[in-house]
Amino acid sequence: MHGTTGLAIAPNGQIFVAELFGGKVSVIKDRGRVRTVFEAGSPSDVTVNGPWLYATTGVFGESGAVVKYHYPKRR
């Protein structure tokens, strides 16, 4: 993980992490397995709401935005 700046824990226990310097949002699943959910420019924070994952991006002034990503519940 490169520059983790925000995390959110889904009801099913998955942990979503914004990697500011890695340029992506990742998920940590059971047994510590990590995979990239999506790539984004300078993501700084994440939150989960149902099947939706929201991330703030572009925190260094490169068109900051909130990204909405559908991530269905999985175990």
Image: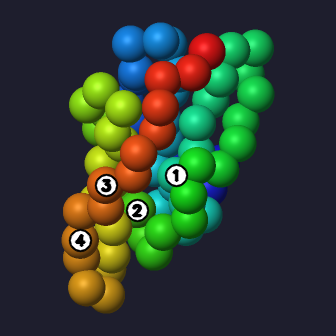
Residue 71 percent coordinates (x, y): 46, 39
Q: Earlier in the sequence, mark 2 or mark 3?
A: 2
Task: Locate residue 25, reporting x and y percent.
Answer: 52, 52
Q: Residue 13, percent across and down? A: 50, 13
Three-letter amino acid code at disc 3?
Lys
Image side of residue 70 versus residue 60, left or right: right
* Disc 4 to disc 2, C-alpha distance: 9 Å
- The residue carrying mark 2 is 43
* Numbered tag placed on residue 65 in the rendering: 4
Which residue lies under the disc numbered 1? 25
Judging depth in this view, the residue of 5 and 70 nearest the camera is 70
Single out the mark in the foreground, 2 or 3.
3
- Between the C-alphas of marks 2 and 1, the distance is 7 Å
- Mark 3 vs mark 1: in front: 3
Mark 2 or 1, nearer chain start: 1
Instruction: Report how far apart the C-alphas of labels 2 and 3 lie in the structure.
Output: 12 Å
Instruction: Say if residue 27 shows up in the picture.
Output: yes
The image quadrant that residue 34 belongs to is top right
Give the CA distance from mark 4 to mark 3.
Answer: 10 Å
Looking at the rendered structure, the secondary structure element under dot 1 is strand
Q: Which residue is mark 3?
A: 68
